[in-house]
Image (spheres, coloured by chain):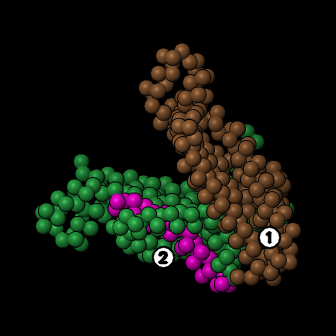
Chain colours: A brown, B green
Amino acid sequence: MDFSYLTNNPGTVLAALGQHIEITALTLAIAIVIAVPLGTLIARISILYTPVLGILGIIYTIPSFALLGFLIQYVGIGIRSSLVALVAYAQFMLVLSVATGLRGVDSAVIDAGRGMGMTDRQILFRIEYPLALPVMVAGLRVATVATIAIASVAALDDAGGLGALLFDGINNSFASTSEVQVGAIAVSLLAIAADLLLRAAQRAVPAARAG
Amino acid sequence: MHLFHGIASAVGGVLQYIRANPDDFRAKLDTHLELSLFALLIAFVICFPLGVAISRSRIASFWALNLVGIARAVPSIAILFLAYPFLGLGFRPALLALAVLASPPILFNTNAGFRNVDPALREAAYGMGMTTAQVLRRIELPLALPVILAGVRTAAVEVIASATLATFIGGGGLGDYINEGLGNLTVGQNVLLVGVVSVSVLTLVAQLLLGGLELWARRVAVPQ
């Protein structure tokens, strides 16, 4: 392993890491805003469940490099194409986990809430979402790891981030092996860190709720 | 509507390109399929026995699942790019990187498939005088098969999708079209889309075919 690129350009690597985290966070924020209502809707209206997840599943199957290529062609090059692709990929896991979480809530608990005079809104926010939270966090974990991975391909779209180190390295005909290695290791460590962090969150959720 | 129109004209352009350059397309498709199939094969030959072995031990499966589970977070593009400094450019490094990528789902699902076999069935088979090999082949394997095939499906879709990235380390395949097209957006419109559409279709076909195989295994294996 050759980490000379990191020791020679710590600022560049750090900036790329920051950018990568920024793209990932922005993607997930937008994706969650779409996925929570959508997941809730298909958990309620069961005829929508299969078609919506079917379409999102097909999008999730399309290789990221291919979808990005398509969007660059039709939306144009730049961060907008990347964000569209990243948000579209994150939808499947997020919507699936929200819907699965809500469907798994024991109907007796909901009845109990209703019996206590709770409104539908109160039942949703105080009973259903909290009980579905562990499943939703599990979905968020998978979506986060996938977003970090796909965001490195998005560097092709001038989105920046750690992927830029990879592609910069190969555009120089692999003249900078160290740059490629540093980029690949950094993005791997970021994905592993996010995975471990959200695994911990997954375990912490039931405990916090029982609080 | 704009998007649908876009997709329709894209598919038209792609078919036209393929008809005009059949040999070139054929060669790239072949490389893509070779990369994907050999990677799956290597992963299966290593991970199927390994999965069976760790399924016999609670401690081994706990450690294997956790370690491999964490390693699985590593993005496929990072695995491909990390192969380059050690193995150089070309088909073989790409193949090895893809085999690494295909391994976790096969290992996990083989382990899960064998662990999920009802111990009562296993004991009944031994009670009938079957040998360990017979129990493995006639009882455990058919019952675990649908879960194992689900792992192969996940691995196949991941590998076919990631084989698109092999183009960056000179591995060839359909990703070459996308790479070429992105390198020259004005001239490369159709070239780019040939890659996009054919790779997407390939992953969807793999998903459907292996999904069908899984359903078949479920129907055949589970006693009615």
- Which residue is more in the foreground, A162 or B200? A162
- Which residue is more in the foreground, A106 or B213? A106
- Which residue is more in the foreground, B146 or A125? A125
- Crowding at dot 2, Cα within 10 Å, few <14 / some 14-19 / many 20+, comes out as some
* B56 inside magenta stretch: no
Estimate the spatial distance between the alpha carbons at disc 1 and disc 2, rounded to whole Å: 30 Å
- Relative side of B204 to B88, left or right: left
Type of amino acid under label 1: Leu
Q: Secondary structure at mark 1?
A: helix
Pointer 1: what residue? A165
* B106 inside magenta stretch: yes
The span shown in magenta is B86-115
Task: State the residue lying farthest toward the left.
Answer: B128
Task: State the residue lying farthest toward the front.
Answer: A211
- Relative side of A69 to B32, left or right: right
Identity of the residue drawn at 84% across and 55% down: A78
Identity of the residue drawn at 69% across and 58% down: A148
Identity of the residue drawn at 66% across and 61% down: A193
- Relative side of B213 to B95, left or right: left
Q: Secondary structure at mark 2?
A: helix
- Crowding at dot 1, Cα within 10 Å, few <14 / some 14-19 / many 20+, comes out as many
Q: Residue A138, how many percent across, how many down?
A: 56, 48
Identity of the residue drawn at 63% across and 66% down: B74
* Chain letter for the residue marked with disc 1 in the picture: A
* Chain letter for the residue marked with disc 2 in the picture: B
Q: Residue A127, how many percent across, how many down?
A: 55, 29
Principal secondary structure, stretch drawn in magenta: helix
Pointer 2: what residue? B42
